[in-house]
């Protein structure tokens, strides 16, 4: 009985999101952004959605900035966050022509030599700008785009986002099935572009890499590093710049040509340093509402977990905490 209720609620969620998306897509963009302006007022001033988290993240990341500048970035972030939510809502129905006009790819031809060599690549991206709009990439590159995602507990919500992300030719695969699918495609001779959002907070105890990022000790996902090393896949950073309201330009920057020949964590460090430079240049467009720094230091993290640097299964190296 309870299982059936869950299935019904999943269906309701799916059709509600489809209906809401379909309605939103019929509205002109000026109307969408008018609604976004109202949403900003409600979210920022009335609901105060994650205000303490955002403020803390900004203050700790930019200790040199006065509070008036922090507040300015904060408000700009919330305005963009509302724009992002509404822009993403219309994606299932927005025309391909509109997408091409609003999300421009400047140098997709950079991947052509790798495709001709049947060489797969890795694209590391971040929760910056509007990352949902970026999944039109298959229309601009020859590689098969494989994008990892974390499945939602609500099957209806999961189905909605899966269909949205796969609309333009992306193959979405769960995090646990990424390697298996990547290897399968490469064995079949299919050049793959593996798309990874690499700025999330790692969840597991065995976090092997901590570095100084935005003035804070930060655990970094090592998935892109491990995959690139094991299969020697060139790593590119997926740069996104917001050039106007609802308009973005994307470019691709080579971080490492032959990861297998580099020292451990070199690839990760290159990715982190570039992301940091992007955020410092225009901080408002990163996802500051994320609980990125739940644990202030690696040792604090171990203490909460009831561990020490000498505990079995804990990999800890003081050299990995690099303070410039």
Image (cartoon, helix red, strand yellow):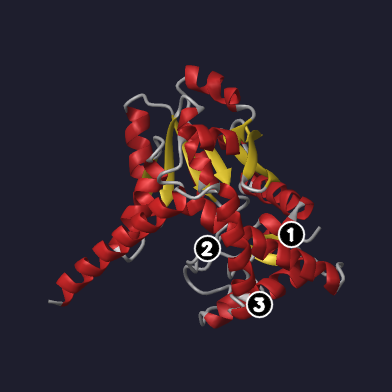
Q: Nearer the viewer, mark 2 or mark 3?
A: 3
Q: Secondary structure at mark 1?
A: loop
Residue 217, image x, y percentages? 69, 67
- Residue with the mark numbered 2: 202
Quarter containing the N terminus:
bottom left
Q: Earlier in the sequence, mark 1 or mark 2?
A: 2
Q: Is residue 317 visible?
A: no
Q: Residues within 10 Å of mark 1 (few under 14, many from 20)?
A: few
Q: Is residue 212 above or below residue 145?
A: below
Residue 320, image x, y percentages? 67, 59
Q: Nearer the viewer, mark 1 or mark 2?
A: 2
Q: Residue furthest left?
A: 1
- Residue with the mark numbered 1: 322
Q: Is residue 261 left or right of residue 166?
A: right
Residue at left offset 45%, top offset 37%: 95
Q: Earlier in the sequence, mark 2 or mark 3?
A: 3
Residue 40, image x, y percentages? 62, 67
Q: Secondary structure at mark 2?
A: loop
- Residue with the mark numbered 3: 45
């Amino acid at each position: 009985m309870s299982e059936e209720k869950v299935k019904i609620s999943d269906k309701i969620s799916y059709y509600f999101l489809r209906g809401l998306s379909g309605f939103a897509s019929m509205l002109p963009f000026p109307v969408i952004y008018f609604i976004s302006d109202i949403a900003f007022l409600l979210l920022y001033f009335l609901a105060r959605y994650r205000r303490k988290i955002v403020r803390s993240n900004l203050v700790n990341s930019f200790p040199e900035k006065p509070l008036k500048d922090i507040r300015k970035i904060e408000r700009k972030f919330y305005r963009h966050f509302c724009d992002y939510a509404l822009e993403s809502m219309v994606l299932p129905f927005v025309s391909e022509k509109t997408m091409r006009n609003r999300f421009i790819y400047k140098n997709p031809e950079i991947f052509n030599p790798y495709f001709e060599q049947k060489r797969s690549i890795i694209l590391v991206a971040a929760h910056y700008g509007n990352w949902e709009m970026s999944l039109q990439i298959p229309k601009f590159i020859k590689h098969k785009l494989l994008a990892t995602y974390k499945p939602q507990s609500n099957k209806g919500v999961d189905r909605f986002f899966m269909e949205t992300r796969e609309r333009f030719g992306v193959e979405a695969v769960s995090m646990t099935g990424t390697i298996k699918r990547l290897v399968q495609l490469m064995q079949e001779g299919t050049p793959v572009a593996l798309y990874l959002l690499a700025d999330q907070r790692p969840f597991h105890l065995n976090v092997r890499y901590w570095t100084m990022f935005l003035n804070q000790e930060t655990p970094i996902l090592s998935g892109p590093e491990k995959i690139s090393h094991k299969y020697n896949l060139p790593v590119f950073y997926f740069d996104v710049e917001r050039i106007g309201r609802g308009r973005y330009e994307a470019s691709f920057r080579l971080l490492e040509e032959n990861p297998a020949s580099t020292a451990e964590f070199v690839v990760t460090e290159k990715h982190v340093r570039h992301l940091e430079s992007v955020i410092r240049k225009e901080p408002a467009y990163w996802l500051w509402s994320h609980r990125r720094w739940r644990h202030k230091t690696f040792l604090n993290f171990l203490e909460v977990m009831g561990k020490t640097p000498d505990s079995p299964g804990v990999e800890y190296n003081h050299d990995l905490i690099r303070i410039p």
